[in-house]
């Protein structure tokens, strides 16, 4: 299985993020560049444990709104300013902190496109599969080839109800849902359990030795592939 696209809307530090890839990816960046947010986005969609816990309001993007008088500000929200900048009273062309309000988006969402699903996952998600174009993205042109490869989109949405001060979240199939009308085709837990992704607890050390956590987790997925990969690594080191 491969991930060919990740889209995020109003999720954590992003108002709009659209990443496409065709090969292996290494995530690099300075502190607060969004590396942790990227991992969190994938976790919310793909890890079956993510919806067993209560949703968190920090997953929904927040921006700053100047509400008091200020020079040439005109009550304009700036989505590129981090909430932490409230610590600096000179932010926003000298607007005092008392004139600044935190504005939270009504929802945050992450959508992931998966390809090369394998027969078991394809069977379980049959009704939500979509044709792909030559770039391995969902072909929504309406003219997809009948022999086109099939992919799967899965999305996570967390919604904030300001009146009730409550949060709800859902993992759903975008292909068969209508968020605008509140209709969500929920992804069964069994489908998320079939997705070959390993999420690790940072508190546990990763060890490649036979009895180590990393080796055990990999062997649970595909022991033959692990052996082949280790032999290849050994040959490269030699």
Image (tube, rainbow, N blue to C red):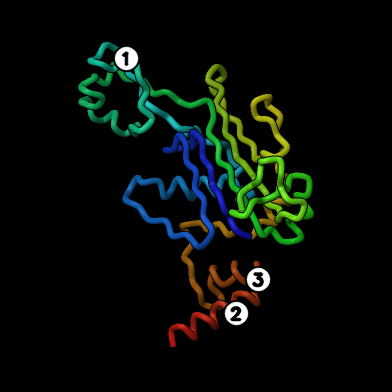
Name the mark nearer the viewer: 1 or 2.
1
The residue beneath circle 2 is 227
Tags 3 and 1 touching, CB below 8 Å: no
Judge left or right: residue 195 versus residue 127. Answer: left
| 95 to the left or right of 77 | left
Q: Is residue 217 above or below residue 185?
A: below
Q: Position of residue 69 (x, y in %)?
A: 26, 11
* Residue at 68 percent of width and 52 percent of height: 151
Element carrying mark 2: helix
- Give left or right: position of 234 versus 146: left
Task: Please state which of the two labelled residues, at mark 3 or mark 1, is closer to the viewer.
Answer: 1
Q: In the drawing, what numbered circle is on residue 222?
A: 3
What is the CA distance from the residue labelled 2 to the residue labelled 3? 9 Å
- Tag 1 residue: 74
User: Horizontal and vertical percent for residue 33?
Assistant: 36, 46
Indicate which disc, 3 or 1, sits on the residue closer to the N terminus. Answer: 1
Label 2 neighbour load within 10 Å: few <14, some 14-19, many 20+: few
Identify whether 95 is placed above or below 8: above
């Amino acid at each position: 299985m491969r991930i060919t696209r990740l889209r995020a809307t109003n999720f954590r530090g992003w108002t709009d993020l659209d990443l496409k890839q065709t090969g292996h990816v290494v995530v690099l960046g300075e502190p607060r560049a969004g590396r942790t947010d990227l991992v969190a986005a994938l976790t919310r969609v793909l890890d079956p444990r993510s919806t067993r816990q209560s949703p968190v309001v920090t997953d929904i993007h927040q921006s700053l709104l100047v509400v008091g008088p200020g020079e040439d500000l005109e009550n304009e929200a700036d989505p590129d300013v981090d909430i932490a900048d409230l610590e600096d009273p000179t932010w926003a062309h000298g607007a005092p902190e008392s004139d600044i309000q935190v504005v939270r988006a009504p929802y945050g969402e992450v959508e992931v496109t998966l390809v090369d699903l394998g027969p078991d996952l394809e069977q379980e998600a049959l009704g939500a599969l979509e044709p792909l174009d030559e770039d391995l993205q969902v072909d929504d042109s309406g003219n997809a080839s009948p022999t086109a490869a099939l992919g799967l989109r899965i999305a996570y949405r967390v919604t904030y109800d300001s009146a009730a001060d409550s949060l709800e979240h859902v993992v759903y199939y975008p292909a068969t849902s209508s968020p605008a009308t509140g209709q969500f085709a929920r992804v069964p837990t069994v489908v998320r359990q079939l997705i070959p992704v390993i999420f690790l607890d940072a508190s546990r050390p990763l060890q490649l030795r036979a009895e180590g956590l990393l080796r055990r987790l990999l062997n649970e997925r595909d022991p033959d592939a692990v052996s082949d990969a280790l032999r290849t690594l050994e040959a490269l080191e030699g």
